[in-house]
Amino acid sequence: MKPADVGLAVMVAVIWGLAFVASRIALDELSPVLMTALRFSIASVPCLFVPRPKVAWPILVATSFTLFLGQFLAQAYGIAHGVPVGLSSVIVQSQALFTIAFAVVAFGEWPTRMQAIGIAIAACGLLMICGTVGYDFGVAAFAVLMISPISFAIGNLLLRRAQDVPMFELSTWLCLVAAVPLLALALASDGVQPTWYALTHMSATVLVCMLIIGGVSTCIAYWLWGRLLRDYTAAQVAPFALLVPFVGSAASSIVFHETFGPLRLAGMLTVIGGIAVMLLSKRAQIQPKLA
């Protein structure tokens, strides 16, 4: 990779890591549904200037509802209900484990030996983290948060159906498709008056956080990441995502004084180690399904 593109990949990972902290701050004033709706509403503004990508509506909706709506709504719910920011960033990155597992079922892409080892390592780490559930956050919050990497993984596979499409156009329209039902859900679940009050009495800090989350982390960062994936192989780009949980955990420890017990810290490092083995191993071989 060119040095400039390496810098871009690192910058995107840092932005995504810091976005976890910004989300936690915004959730002090906004409900998870409203915060997620605002995220995608801001990110979808460029739809006013770019045409809809040539992707069938069912694929566009399914990809948006998994890759964006499901992933980030579950993530916001988990953080809002006590799951630490640093831990959340690690759990979300476990999507690599689920992506490989689902690819076996959907496309018959069997993992290599090293990828299978990485899956086993990451799974052990998740089990270690599960052993810490119930001390500072509930089982329900953790269960909902686990929807995030699963939705992320399904969205990754659906994204394959939208090949040869400009990434900026695709990402902004995916945001718009997610924003519409989220706004309706916010009005239905939070109420019209509480939603209006939250929007009109938003503090300057939360407003800045939402602009960062929606405009920078979602709109710009996903566009840059898509450009990198277009210009380089996934094996060259994907490992930079390993920086996200490290940035998120470090930033959370500074801003919120977040600490981790020995078992949880060991589980987080084990998950990241397993993901590293998966991403740095050779590409999975594609085997045809039996009739």
Image (cartoon, rainbow, N blue to C red):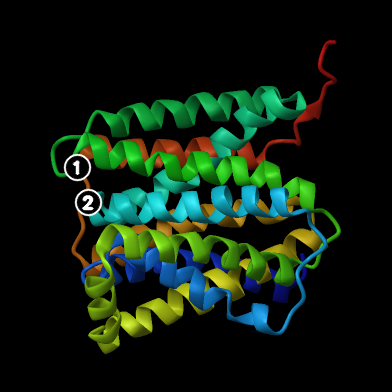
Say which of 192 and 260 sits in front. 192
Above or below residue 104? Residue 183 is below
Q: Earlier in the sequence, mark 2 or mark 1?
A: 2
Q: Position of residue 27 (x, y in %)?
A: 27, 66
Query: What residue appears at the point 51 percent right and 35 percent down from the top-left corner?
Result: 274
Q: Residue furthest bottom?
A: 204
Q: Which mark is on residue 47?
A: none
Q: Secondary structure at mark 2?
A: loop
Given the image, on which type of amino acid does mark 2 rest? His
Q: Tell me the distance, in whole angstroms, between the alpha carbons under discs 2 and 1.
A: 19 Å
Describe residue 27's horizontal placement relative to residue 135 as left or right: right
Towards the viewer: 96 or 160: 160
In the rendered image, the quadrant that contains the N terminus is: bottom right
Task: Residue 248: tell me if it is visible.
Answer: yes
Q: Position of residue 227 (x, y in %)?
A: 74, 67
Check if mark 2's residue and mark 1's residue have beta carbons within 8 Å: no
Q: Which residue is mark 2?
A: 81
Q: Residue furthest left?
A: 135
In this view, the residue in front, 160 or 8, is 160
Q: Nearer the viewer, mark 2 or mark 1?
A: 2
Q: Residues within 10 Å of mark 1 (few under 14, many from 20)?
A: few
**Rendered residue at 24%/28% (across/down):** 131
Residue pictured at 50% horizontal, 78% vertical: 42
Horizontal arrangement in the rendering, residue 7 relative to residue 227 (left or right): left
Q: Which residue is mark 1?
A: 261
Question: Picture coordinates of residue 118 (x, y %)?
Answer: 56, 30
158 is higher (above) or lower (below) than 115:
below
Which quarter of the figure has residue 140?
A: top left
Pinpoint residue 16: horizontal percent, then vertical percent. Answer: 48, 65
What amino acid does circle 1 point to? Gly
Q: Can residue 10 be seen in the rendering of this structure?
A: no
Image position of 64 with respect to 197: above or below: above
